[in-house]
Amino acid sequence: SSTTPEANARAPCAYLHVRCKMGETRKCDVLVVGAGPGGYVAGIRAAQLGLKTIVVEADKAGGTCLIRGCIPSKAIIHAAERFESLRQHSSEGGHMGLSVGGEPQVDMAALVSWKDSIVERLNKGVEGLLKSAGADLVKGWANFIGPKSCTVETSEGSVDIEAENIIIATGSSHIDLPFMPCDEEFILSSTGALDLDSLPKSAAIVGGGYIGLELGCALAKLGTEVTVIEGLDNILAIMDRELCRPLEIWLKKHGVVVHTNALARGAVIKGKGASRKVELAFEKDGEEHTVKVDRVLVTVGRKPNTKGWGLENTGVRMDAAGRFIRIDRQCRTSVPGIYAIGDVAGEPMLAHKASAEGEMVAEIIAGHKREFDKVAIPAIVFTEPEIISVGLTPDEAEERGEQIIVGKFPLAASGRALSIEAEKTGGFIRVTARESDHVILGVQAVGTHVAELHAEFILALEMGALLEDVAGTVHAHPTMSEAFHESVLKTLGRAIHIS
């Protein structure tokens, strides 16, 4: 149940791995509602631990991340990067001494089909993993009638399920603007943007957060004229300004028009047939403006899926704002035996947080002693360039009263970065450490191909590493990871490859 009731009304339902008789009441140790990155991980781990486990999902196993979010968007981003490279090689004189004859073309329908093949493969993989672990996957929409009991509406009728423990993993969905609802034809959500049958010549993106900018960068690489409408002072408000500057440079260089302090006011579809356009109205500096585009993409945030499946019948309490289910450090709700994980349980709304919580909760139910005590949860934005933030930024550390030292190493000084053009946007790696004992408090990075470096950053923080611990390790040459080593040396005042 990681999508909305409206979406699930259109979703095909069929039993997988277990067939139930209409009117049958099934009992289990663990019922997981939602098979997204939190739910399916919880289901697999619970079954591995010998708990009788049922996972209920109304759509495809894998949830938003796998089906209509992280994975398909990264596939399209990768394809856009390949296309941009082809365009460079086909330009006059080529690039890197390489040239391609003729102008490369985009077949959007074929690109989306390739993306869908990846999603289908991973969906089947998740279903196979649940089956091999011993968890039962039931496809249908769950409606709770009490704290530990629900009715699942499937294509073959309703099935009642009673469980000793419930794991709520219903995920989140995009936020519609009431004055500009998504029709998925001209006004798109991120879901619609990932299923385009043709490449729009122009597009306006309402919302300059990570979802909009990731897709905006991909569309710009594919050749779409992109305009971004952002209500705040800056795009990508979750990151500090220093990290955003290389992205802003790239956007400007690629002709992406960015309007900040601008509020969308509505959209009207004008024209007939193939000439139809969307006229988007927005307010900036007290004046009304309009822009005509082929498509409008609305990416103003996501909301937890807390309605439409009987949450009110479970008795669980919400947080102070009434948005998320309230949990403790073990993901326990106010009702014994009911847990909530992932997007429905609070920020950050990230797939990897949900997966970590799902694994932990399954082990808690099995009697293990666990709690969610992560030092940091990495945040990565797959724009061009990519942006990583792990732990505290310098400003955040100082706000907490820390006396800090900061070191920054430019990717332009890295041989490996130069050889794969990872430095072309002015990227860098920045390290923040406590001055008194040199404990690393945070690491941020921006640059092409830097996302995979996050693993070393988060491991350093979780292990409580000192600057000297990283400085004393041998990093292979030539690799991007050397830039992290050098940034640590810079923080210590003894960098080798920059003065």
Image: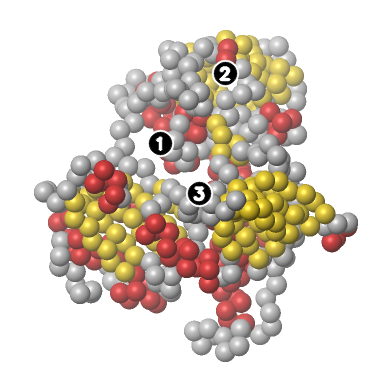
Say the numbered circle drawn on residue 356.
Answer: 1
Q: Residue furthest bottom?
A: 93
Q: Residue furthest front?
A: 286
Q: Label 2 neighbourhood size at 10 Å, few (<14), some (14-19), many (20+)?
A: some
- Of the numbered discs 1 and 3, the one sitting upstream in the chain is 3
Q: Which residue is mark 2?
A: 311
Q: Most extreme residue toward the right, as rendered?
A: 272
Q: Amino acid at mark 3?
A: Leu
Q: Residues within 10 Å of mark 3 (few under 14, many from 20)?
A: some
Distance between the alpha carbons at the discs numbered 1 and 3: 32 Å
On screen, residue 217 above or below 72: below
Looking at the image, is mark 3 or mark 2 earlier in the sequence? 3
Comparing labels 1 and 3, the label whose residue is closer to the camera: 3
Check disc 1 and give the amino acid type.
Ala
Q: Is residue 18 left or right of residue 370?
A: right
Q: Secondary structure at mark 1?
A: helix
Mark 1 neighbour class, 10 Å CA radius: few under 14, some 14 to 19, many 20 or more: some
Quadrant location, the C terminus: bottom left
Point 75% across, 22% down: residue: 156
Observer-nearest of 90 and 397: 397
Q: Quadrant of residue 78?
A: bottom right
Q: Nearer the viewer, mark 2 or mark 1?
A: 2
Q: Position of residue 154 (x, y in %)?
A: 71, 24
Q: Considering the image in quadrants, where does the N terminus appear? A: top right
Res 232 label: 3
Give the CA distance from mark 2 to mark 1: 23 Å
Q: How is the image coloured?
A: secondary structure
Q: Secondary structure at mark 2?
A: helix
Residue 343 in the image: state x and y as whole percent. 50, 34
Amino acid at circle 2: Leu
